[in-house]
Amino acid sequence: KDGHPVRAGDKSIRFEVRPGDCGHNDGWSDCKKDRERHELSGKRISSGEWWHAWSIFLPEDFINVSPAKVALGQFHQEKGHVVWMFQNQSDYTRGGYWFDNQVPGYTKSLDRLLTNENMIGKWNDILVNVKWSKKDNGFFKVWVNNKLIHEYMGPTKTKSKVYFKFGIYRSYLKRWIYSPRNKNKEKGVPTQVVYFDEVRTGKTKDKVVGKLPPLN
């Protein structure tokens, strides 16, 4: 009723990042690392098969800030590097939703899950089935709107514990500031707003999918 989009129920989670929204903790500073973010973190998981689900919505006025990097969901390791990242763009201009395999500590593969046209002003449902393992018996599968888009077999982590983070996390901000795409010569990266809803983690698919109404 207040005009904010929801996937189901009465509420969604709204993230907004403005220029200068950088934070720090012991041993790390976004402000010193050319980064800005607002994120929430999930439970720590050590091993085994798990299901993760979330719905994501980009407003009509969402600005693609390539060549800066924007993560809208990531699986991170405790005391280690990120292993799987969901990015708004990776090809500088087209936007969309990209799936980045960083298990070895660098981008091993990069696959587009959604085009920009299929994200702006629309809800999209993401479902992940993963077996967390340092060995070759691991797997990582991604469904978008009930369609299997990506399937990987092999190690899915390198450290002991993994956790899901979601929100807006943008890095390499100077790439935008000094880019020809910054036509107004702004000194900061434009404000971005993203909505998440129906964010769940569980041991079975039924625990995370719920009963969502059909997408329009």
Image (cartoon, rainbow, N blue to C red):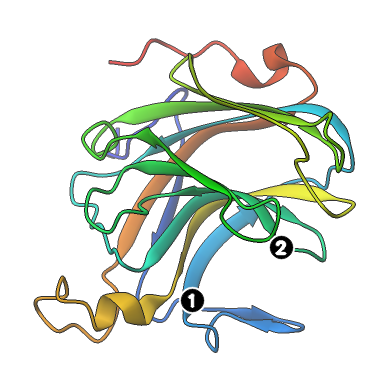
Give the spatial CA distance, label 1 vs label 2.
16 Å
Q: Is residue 86 left or right of residue 152?
A: left
Give the total number of marks visible in the rendering. Answer: 2
Q: Quadrant of residue 209?
A: top right
Query: For the residue carrying disc 1, how many other residues have a C-alpha within 10 Å: few (<14), some (14-19), or many (20+)?
Result: many
Taking 191 as reference, is 115 above or below it? above
Taking 99 as reference, is 182 above or below it? below
Give the number of the disc on residue 81. Answer: 2
Q: Amino acid at mark 2?
A: His
Q: Amino acid at mark 1?
A: Arg
Taking 46 as reference, is 185 above or below it? below
Give residue 77's position: percent from left, percent from top.
Answer: 77, 56
Q: Secondary structure at mark 1?
A: strand
Q: Residue at x 84, y 42 (%)?
A: 45
Q: Residue at x 24, y 39 (%)?
A: 120
Question: Which is more toward the observer, 82 or 5?
Answer: 82
Q: Quadrant of residue 97?
A: top left
Give residue 136's position: percent from left, percent from top.
Answer: 83, 34
In the picture, which quadrant includes the N terminus?
Answer: top left
